[in-house]
Amino acid sequence: MDHIVYYTTGILVISVFVFIILEKKFPYTKGLKIFREGFWVDLVWYTFIQSYFLKILIFDYILTPIDNHYHLSSLKLVYNWPIIWQVLFFLVTHDFYIYWFHRWQHHSKLLWRTHEAHHSNKEVDWLAGTRSHSIEILINQTIEFAPIILLGANPIIVPIKALIDAVWGMYIHSNINVKSGKLQYIINGPEMHQWHHADQREVFYSNYSTKFAIWDWLFGTAYLPDKKPQRFGLYYSYPKDYFLQHLFAIKKIDEEKLLEHKGFKAYYELRPRLMKFLGLIKDKKPDKVKQPETKMPAQTLVEDLK
Ligand SMILES: [Zn+2]
Ligand SMILES: [Zn+2]
């Protein structure tokens, strides 16, 4: 069991390099830098720190206690299925769930609060998909891994499923100019998911699929024009700081205003200063909050577009 994690981690690291190389060679949007705005927030906070703590919370404090109480996994309901069938079963059922939950997040004012972080990157690449509010991850990964644990799947399904999620997640967000032809009716990829992140009205309610694009085609939400999006991200201003992004789900915060406070400014500039000190970034002004033009007030987000 333990060594499977070495393999999955190895494949994950190799995949990162493959995606970075392919993004350089065949960019979907030209001129996008590796160290784009928000790169470090996504890598350090969302990818490493948040997922580390959420994994402990979901597995050790939610799923294991539930299983200890009901002993469902001991029934081993799917344990004897071939591994490939177990993987496919959990892959397809979860993907069907996530399509509808994602669609609901875009239609419900309340649930949108848990999802807007995911749409906040103005440049979308292999790493951009990791940006998801911890509440969103908590809901989705608990629902994803609960049946795997409670139906008594083979324990190797957990790291295999986590690897598939990570690699497929990087793929659909990657800035690679993929032309998958008819395959795009079944397998989701950047062709459709890059559009899902566009700041363009015509796609606000399209392309909800994660792994299998077939859901969008079946349920009438597919959008795949010949052109490419002009802008990405949210149409209203959104904080760049990890903690403010989390707080934003509860209370709308004006980051620019907060920067007028010395204490916050010192904290905000700590990371760029430290990186400059370590020689990791060139002499450049610390990230300043740019206010994107607001075309409509944030509150009207869902109602307005219904
Ligand atoms: Zn979305
Ligand atoms: Zn996405």
Image: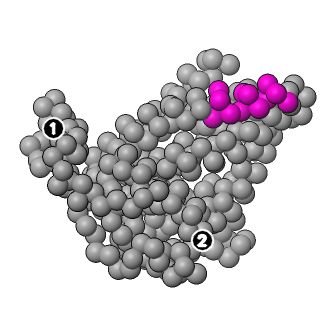
The residue positioned 22% from the left and 40% from the top of the image is: 267
Label 2: how many Cα within 10 Å (few below 14, some 14–19, many 20+): some
Queried whether the magenta region covers residue 92, the answer comes back as no
At horizontal 65% and vertical 29% (from top left) the residue drawn is 61
Residue occupying image coordinates x 72% and y 71%: 218
Left or right relative to 87: residue 174: left
What residue sits right under mark 1 in the picture?
Answer: 273
Closer to the chain start, of discs 2 and 1, is 2
Q: Secondary structure at mark 2?
A: helix
* Residue 77 horizontal/vertical position (percent): 89, 34
Q: Which residue is mark 2?
A: 107
Determine crowd level at label 1: few under 14, some 14-19, many 20+ residues with C-alpha closer than 10 A: some
x%, y% of residue 281? 17, 39
Amino acid at the residue labelled 1: Arg
Q: Is residue 166 visible?
A: yes
Looking at numbered disc 2 in the image, what kind of residue is underneath it? His
Q: Is residue 219 left or right of residue 291?
A: right
